[in-house]
Amino acid sequence: KAGVTQTPRYLIKTRGQQVTLSCSPISGHRSVSWYQQTPGQGLQFLFEYFSETQRNKGNFPGRFSGRQFSNSRSEMNVSTLELGDSALYLCASSLGVLAGVSSYEQYFGPGTRLTVT
Amino acid sequence: SQELEQSPQSLIVQEGKNLTINCTSSKTLYGLYWYKQKYGEGLIFLMMLQKGGEEKSHEKITAKLDEKKQQSSLHITASQPSHAGIYLCGAALQLIFGTGTRLQVFP
């Protein structure tokens, strides 16, 4: 079974620009979560989507948004980029809910390293 | 909000030595994950603990969950260079992660 894939792997953007990152979950997984990882703050939860609906949201400004498509693929968008947005963005997929039992065992993609200059 | 504190932050051990990493939660744990991360890469799932007192092993890695202490420990026996990386604990349901422990193993 193919793992979680993220594209692009590396990205360099300028302050003020916007960026869209993509995540394809493991086949059959309906939940996709996004995380931001920086040396200073560690791994921080951005949001989670399940069946095209945002189910959970972390404490990030509205410049960070996401969506999930009917095939469970997800995109994350950051508008008006700031230098502090430079980070490794990780996507993780899980079954979500199966027959009423939550399964949060998450499988992570390799990440997209975003550098804002 | 809940926080997960890991200790130590960094660990350097000689190959063959045993080591333990701890993860302490500020609130009740409803389950805990352990992950390993190579620098700049995604996280690799190691194991999940769901019940107090539960202990799981995978190869030379053993993890235990102490619900009363709101703490989990990860123990590596006879460490190898391949064990090097960053170990992260994550709280199930709460979608938060610990601060990470960087492990280096030298020959």
Image (cartoon, coloured by chain):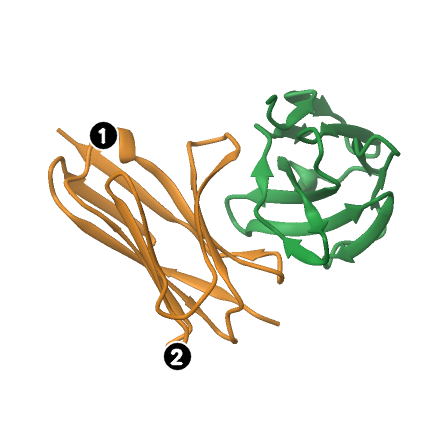
Crowd around label 1: few <14 · some 14–19 · many ≥20 (10 Å): some
Indicate the amino acid at tag 2. Lys
Pointer 2: what residue?
Answer: B68
Residue lying at the far front in this picture: please name it.
A99
Left or right of B62? Residue A5 is right
Give left or right: position of B97 versus A117.
Answer: left
* Residue sitting at the far bottom: B68
Tag 1's secondary structure? helix
Chain painted green: A
Asked if residue B39 lies left or right of residue A13, the reply is left
Quadrant of the image occupied by residue B2: bottom right
Q: Earlier in the sequence, mark 2 or mark 1?
A: 2
Location of the N terminus of chain A by quadrant is: top right
Where does the image place residue B31, in percent across and percent down from the top left? 50, 63
Disc 1: host chain: B
Q: Position of residue B21 (x, y in %)?
A: 30, 55
Q: With respect to residue A75, does B24 lie above or below?
A: below
- Name the colour assigned to chain B in the rendering: orange
Residue A28, numbered label: none
User: Marks 1 and 2: in contact by CB < 8 Å?
Assistant: no
Given residues A67 and A31, the one toward you in this image is A31
Residue on which the image places disc 1: B81
Residue at x 57%, y 38% (from the top left corner): A107
Q: Chain of mark 2?
A: B
Task: Classify mark 2: helix, strand or loop.
Answer: loop
| Residue at screen point 83% across, 34% down | A16
Residue A43 in the image: state x and y as whole percent: 56, 48
